[in-house]
Image (cartoon, rainbow, N blue to C red):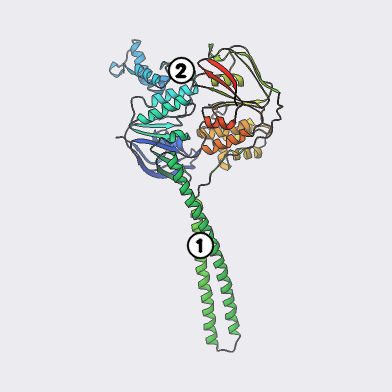
Amino acid sequence: MPVLTFTETALARPDATPLIAAFSLSLEAGVTGLVGGNGTGKSSLLAAIAGAHPHAGHIHASTPPRRLAQLAPRQGTRVADLFDAAGFDRLQAALAGAPVDYDLVDWTLEERMAAALAQAGVPVAPARGLSELSGGQQRRAALAAAFFDAPGIVLLDEPTNDLDAEGRALVAELLATHRGIALVASHDRALLERVDRIIELAPGGVHLFGGGWSAFAAARAAAEARAAAELERAGAEVARARRAAQTAEMRAARRARQGRALRDGSQSKMLLDKAREGAEAAGAGQSRLATRQQTTAVARLAAAQAGVVRDRAISFDLPSTGLAAQKLVLRACDLGVGQAGRALLPPLSFELRGPERVRLSGANGSGKSTLLRQIAGRLPPLSGRIERPVDSVYLDQRLSHLGQAGDVLSLARRTLPEMGEQDCRALLARLLFRNREALKPLAGLSGGERLRLGLALTLGRARPPQLVLLDEPTNHLDLAAIAAVERALGEYDGALIFVTHDSAFAAALAPAREIAIASGRVSDRGLA
């Protein structure tokens, strides 16, 4: 039976800032959810288990783990590279008659890869380029590779990102039939409801909860209620201790005055001195006791404050775009949707006028992202033309415009040259890049942090664009961030075209139209 053990394990960011405080625990067979806000270290912990991130303490995996990372395929990456690149190349060389060590050739490898891909709903050849697939198809292929040949330990980082309903059901099925250890970092509540236990990464440390999301949420709510009650009690205790200290000081001062008054009387010096000393000693004793009680109460208050989880939530308001009700926003005329000369859909023609909200829907690989990229001007159409007479922005699912060089603030200054440094810092702070976090290297950002930054640079302009194009904008975001994006876009008065497989998010945006793609056909319908 596989075992995954952590002994005084701690992680830090590339700049040596602590990321995860030292913790110890042991996991056996079953599915463990890994939760926490964006930037708390979920992806870093999975990378550390896989040996790709430095850490303190020890991590022991009884069998080599298989990791599904957040995908960013490089040019030239093949589907086979997700499985066993060396084994695949050796097999191809042997089949071509090249001299290889035939004892090492796995003659069934390509056949088994193809079978795993077909089972995952991606019936493509292992030699095919990964970048030729849609985001959802890439995710399905990576899932097939992660569970290939039944590994003992599987590490999954946001496995349902980019996936349609069928793909999410596939993830649930793979986890349900897995007989080893699965550690799943996710913000997908439906998926987390199915896990056996949950590990929470929080500023206060690493906490283990039994059961799925509902049990975790209830336990966390109860713990937060207890912490809040303790904070209230500690605050009241500090107030009482301070009042007692003030009273003791007043009494000490009064006794001191009484002692001096006695010295002015007619009694003998010895008796007067003794009375004075007694009064002063009593007053000083009470004052010291009150001070100690106040110190203890303040320490208890500090501990109670540390125990209260203070949610960090992104916040941004979008000013009015000034978009008129019937102004032409977008016109597509006989648009040929596809790439590399391969058409995905019949020619399309449609218009958007005024602050319309349109959802592009369809299964993985149906052509949604391709269509959105063509609308955004990032991909030339196969035929026809696109008119976009208003200012627009596009947030793609890979956040390709962010790059890896430089830091957060420098990128913001380059992207938003009309804003001064203080305005850029204020914008970034609302998206939780505060103080030193605004200087984080882009290469070290988590998936959720990159998406927050993309949102800041896309929507944070002094004058917002009149057309916003979003491709899976909730990928990698924690639940609090998703709620904030819903609120901001709910008040946005420009035109919006978006792709999402998150049905709750789609409902919150309240689109008036849906352009649905199914089996190579397109329907454009109004939504009640």
The residue indicated by pointer 2 is: 129
Q: Is mark 2 on a helix, strand or loop?
A: loop
- Residues 307 and 494: in front is 494
Task: From this view, report whether residue 464 is shown above or below residue 525.
Answer: below
- Residue drawn where x is 58% and y is 72% of the image: 250
Task: From this view, report whether residue 152 is shown above or below residue 303.
Answer: above
Q: Where is residue 54 in the image (x, y as percent from the top left)?
A: 42, 37
Looking at the image, residue 324 sits to the left or right of residue 109; the answer is: right
Looking at the image, residue 18 sits to the left or right of residue 455; the answer is: left
- Residues 342 and 288: in front is 342
Asked whether residue 2 appears in the rendered view, the answer is yes
User: Alpha carbon of mark 1 to alpha carbon of mark 2: how far?
Assistant: 66 Å
Of all residues shown, which one is farthest toward the front? Answer: 528
The residue indicated by pointer 1 is: 295
Asked whether residue 53 appears in the rendered view, the answer is no
- Residues 100 and 234: in front is 234
Q: Is mark 1 on a helix, strand or loop?
A: helix
First in sequence: mark 1 vs mark 2: 2
Q: Position of residue 471 (x, y in %)?
A: 56, 26
Disc 2 marks a residue whose amino acid type is Gly
Task: From this view, report whether residue 228 is shown above or below residue 96.
Answer: below
Looking at the image, residue 85 sits to the left or right of residue 480; the answer is: left
Disc 1 marks a residue whose amino acid type is Thr
- Residue drawn where x is 69% and y is 30% of the image: 321
Q: Looking at the rendered structure, which numbered label has been put on residue 438?
A: none
Query: Dot 1 surroundings within 10 Å: few (below 14), some, or many (20 or more)?
Result: some
Q: In which quarter of the image is the N terminus?
A: top left
